[in-house]
Image: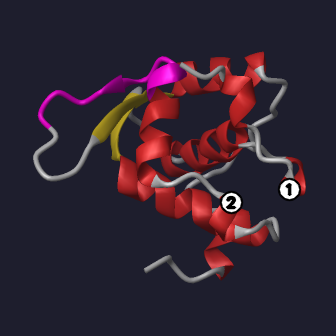
């Protein structure tokens, strides 16, 4: 198994894990739930939108399968009954702890504030 640090992407100063943590932060912001269940596909789409906003190469962003492996390595748990889409349990406290351990400050987003990534169309 490869070390997480070996998966870094050098373009734009953000690595795969940072992109994933920023995407998760945007997806869980404004939620009143302690833990959300998110589909890997939704996380991958948000990662690509962030990469475009940061003017990174979208081809260098991790795909859904790689995102799933990284989420598992980060300690997030897979939702047991995934049906046709893989889903993950994402707890805000765990997300904050992972970001803090990597020296990443997650922006505090509110449900009323629009994200700079909202200016970009969704990935098809």
Apparent side of residue 124 relative to residue 47 in the rendered image (left or right):
left
Q: What whole-number distance in Å separates the C-alpha atoms at marks 2 and 1?
A: 8 Å
Q: For mark 2, does the 10 Å Cα neighbourhood hold few (<14), some (14 to 19), or many (20 or more) residues?
A: some
Q: Residue at x 66, y 68 (%)?
A: 58
Q: Compared to 15, does 102 lie above or below?
A: above
Apparent side of residue 82 relative to residue 116 in the rendered image (left or right):
left
Secondary structure of the residue carrying numbered label 1: helix
Q: Compared to 9, does 60 lie above or below?
A: below
Q: Which residues are magenta?
A: 72-81
Q: Is residue 114 visible?
A: no
| Residue at numbered disc 1 | 11
Q: Earlier in the sequence, mark 2 or mark 1?
A: 1
Give the position of the C terminus as an image quadrant.
Answer: bottom left
Q: Residue at x 41, y 57 (%)?
A: 42
Q: Which mark is residue 60?
A: 2
Q: Residue 44: percent from the left, percent from the top?
A: 49, 56
Q: Compared to 3, does 62 lie above or below?
A: below
Q: Is residue 6 visible?
A: yes
Q: Residue at x 50, y 77 (%)?
A: 122
Render colour scheme: secondary structure
Q: Compared to 61, does 49 lie above or below?
A: below
- Kindly indicate whether the residue at mark 1 contacts the one at mark 2 (C-beta within 8 angstroms): yes
């Amino acid at each position: 198994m490869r070390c997480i640090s070996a998966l870094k992407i050098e373009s734009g100063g953000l690595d795969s894990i940072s992109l994933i943590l920023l995407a998760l932060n945007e997806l869980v912001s404004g939620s009143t739930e302690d833990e959300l269940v998110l589909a890997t596909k939704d996380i991958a789409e948000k990662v690509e939108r962030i990469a475009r906003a940061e003017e990174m190469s979208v081809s260098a962003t991790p795909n859904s399968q790689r995102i799933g492996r990284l989420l598992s390595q980060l300690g997030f748990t897979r939702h047991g009954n995934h049906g046709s889409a893989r889903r993950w349990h994402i707890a805000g406290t765990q997300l904050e702890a992972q970001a803090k351990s990597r020296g990443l400050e997650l922006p505090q987003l509110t449900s009323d504030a629009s994200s700079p990534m909202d200016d970009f169309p969704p990935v098809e």
